[in-house]
Amino acid sequence: MLGEEERVLGVQVVGKDAAEIIQGMALVITMGGCKKDLDNAMAMHPTDAEEFMTMRV
């Protein structure tokens, strides 16, 4: 994340479900999304992708 607005610049993930996680995160990056956008989104629970939505990794 970059700057005061905490803009999401990129994501790295490796594993069996990586493609599905990256697909969702690519949307955030393409739209110029920030941490607050992820905070305001609903994450699927329980999934590995949820950890990326909350940026707790």
Image (cartoon, rainbow, N blue to C red):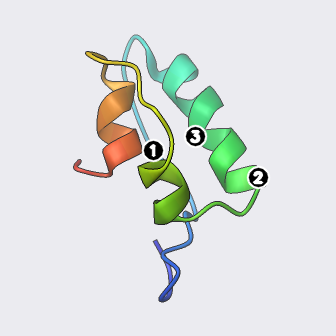
Q: Earlier in the sequence, mark 2 or mark 1?
A: 1
Of residue 56 and residue 17, the one placed in the foreground of this image is: 56
For mark 3, what is the residue? 25
Amino acid type, mark 3: Met
Q: Which callout, 1 or 3, points to the residue nearer the camera?
A: 3
Numbered disc 2: secondary structure = helix
Amino acid type, mark 1: Gln
How far apart are the alpha carbons under marks 3 and 2? 9 Å
For mark 1, what is the residue? 12
Please tell me in which quadrant of the rendered image residue 46 appears.
top left
Above or below — where is 42 with respect to 8?
above
Residue 15, image x and y in percent? 36, 19
Q: Earlier in the sequence, mark 3 or mark 2?
A: 3
- Which label number is shown at residue 36? none
Numbered disc 3: secondary structure = helix
- Asked if residue 6 lies left or right of residue 23, the reply is left
- Asked if residue 39 lies left or right of residue 48, the reply is right
Tag count? 3
Query: Which residue is drawn at the image coordinates 50% and 80% (left, top)?
Result: 2
Residue 55, image x and y in percent? 32, 52
Q: Are marks 1 and 3 in contact (CB under 8 Å)?
A: no
Q: Residues within 10 Å of mark 1 (few under 14, many from 20)?
A: few
- Asked if residue 5 lies left or right of residue 54, the reply is right
Numbered disc 1: secondary structure = loop
Amino acid type, mark 2: Thr
Residue 35, image x and y in percent? 46, 63
Q: Which callout, 2 or 1, points to the residue nearer the camera?
A: 2
Of residue 42 and residue 23, the one placed in the foreground of this image is: 42
For mark 2, what is the residue? 30
How far apart are the alpha carbons under marks 2 and 1? 15 Å
